Amino acid sequence: METRRLGARVMDRGGMPVPKPKPQVIIKRERRGALAHVRRAVRDTVWRRDGGRCRACQRRRGQHVHHLRYRSHGGRWTTANCLLLCHACHQDVHAALLVVIGANADQPDGVHFEARRWW
């Protein structure tokens, strides 16, 4: 395709403007590999420590690793900060229907749960 410059615009042979090529946008993604081995090791340790059961209801299906101090609030991937919860209890914790009381999940009596009812 033959083009010619007319002022600041580039036109093709038929006099139609040729769109400028858009610069490539490089989206930087979080480096997943940087902490993957730490997260995997902590997850495996937490799973063994909690016996593969939810710490709130003792259910064995649909387990999630929950952070006592949220990662967004500076919580770290440590076994003392993580515990195993089933999907339902994990949702209840984040909806404030189930409150986790305690600061150290590594201690047998370091964490207990309190149900909150809104009715």
Image: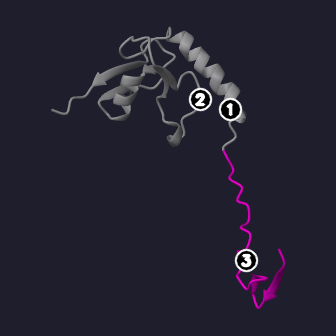
From this viewpoint, which residue is outermost toward the left? 119
C-alpha gap between disc 2 and disc 3: 52 Å
Towards the viewer: 113 or 47? 47
Identify the image quadrant of residue 14: bottom right
What quarter of the picture does the C terminus occupy? top left
Q: Which residues are magenta?
A: 1-29
Give the left or right position of residue 3, taking residue 28 as reference: right
Tag nearer the camera, 3 or 1: 3
Tag nearer the camera, 2 or 1: 1
Amino acid carrying mark 1 in the image: Leu
* Chief SS of the magenta region: loop
Counting residues from the start of the chain, the first of labels 2 and 3 encountered is 3
Where in the figure is residue 100, as x and y percent of width and height? 37, 26
Residue contact between numbered discs 2 and 1, judged by CB atoms under 8 Å: yes
Q: In the image, is residue 63 above or below residue 77?
A: above
Counting residues from the start of the chain, the first of labels 3 and 1 encountered is 3
The circle on residue 77 is: 2
Residue 6 among magenta residues: yes
Towards the viewer: 1 or 41? 1
What quarter of the picture does the N terminus occupy? bottom right
Where in the figure is residue 61, as x and y percent of width and height? 44, 14
Amino acid carrying mark 2 in the image: Trp
Q: Residue at x 70, y 82 (%)?
A: 16
Q: Secondary structure at mark 1?
A: helix
Residue 78 among magenta residues: no
Q: In the image, is residue 6 above or below residue 49?
A: below
Amino acid carrying mark 3 in the image: Val
Give the left or right position of residue 77, taking residue 115 as reference: right
The circle on residue 35 is: 1
Q: Residue at x 49, y 36 (%)?
A: 70
Q: Secondary structure at mark 3?
A: loop
